[in-house]
Image (cartoon, grey):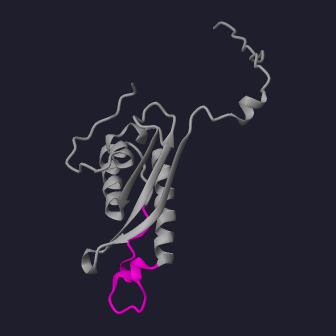
Amino acid sequence: MADTIADTRRLFTRPQNLSDAYGPPSNFLEIEVSSPETVGVGRNRFTTYEIRLKTNLPIFKLKESRVRRRYSDFEWLRGELERESKVVVPQLPGKALFRQLPFRGDDGIFDDSFIEERRTGLEQFLNKVAGHPLAQNERCLHMFLQDEIVDKSYTPSKIRQA
């Protein structure tokens, strides 16, 4: 057996300058869930959230996008990722079934504090999912984040980098 000697010399690195330290990051993905809006009346009432994406990752076709989604769209995305990807998908904030009961004396799922709590949970969910390199290849994630309308009858596939 031949003796191998590990090369322990340090790699040459150039000193960091101010533009390196304070310039834009080489790769970034920013997702913000904001501006909740409750629409509809009675049993057809629901809340939508604006999703803003900014990135320079080459896998995304748009570098900036804004779409509106409701909670059921997030449930669809989670189901698709669980079924189609090899990613362990985090939980969504709960459905709050107790808050949907009639005669509660408050706004239930349309209460401002509940909507804000859910918005925060949805933002955390999206950032965890979209930050995963394997999830970034899923067509359903790209549709959810960048297409105005989610085509729920799409054919699952992987995204190829240009």
Q: Nearer the viewer, residue 150 or 160?
A: 150
Q: Nearer the viewer, residue 128 or 68?
A: 68
Q: Spot the residue most to the top.
A: 2
Indicate the position of residue 152 as horizontal and vertical percent values. Answer: 23, 51
Indicate the position of residue 156 as horizontal and vertical percent values. Answer: 26, 41
Q: Nearer the viewer, residue 9 or 37?
A: 37
Q: Residue at x 47, y 75 (%)?
A: 114
Q: How many marks?
A: 0
Indicate the position of residue 161 as horizontal and vertical percent values. Answer: 40, 27
Which corner quadrant of the image does residue 90 belong to? bottom left
Q: Quadrant of the N terminus?
A: top right
Q: Nearer the viewer, residue 131 or 83?
A: 131
| Magenta run includes residue 95 | yes
| Magenta run includes residue 108 | yes
101 left or right, relative to 5: left
Indicate the position of residue 141 as horizontal and vertical percent values. Answer: 37, 45
For the record, the magenta segment spans 92-111
Q: Spot the residue most to the left.
A: 153
Q: Residue at x 44, y 54 (%)?
A: 51
Q: Residue at x 51, y 57 (%)?
A: 124
Image position of 92 with respect to 137: above or below: below
Q: Quadrant of the C terminus?
A: top left
Image position of 15 with respect to 111: above or below: above
Image position of 144 with respect to 103: above or below: above
Majority secondary structure in the magenta region? loop
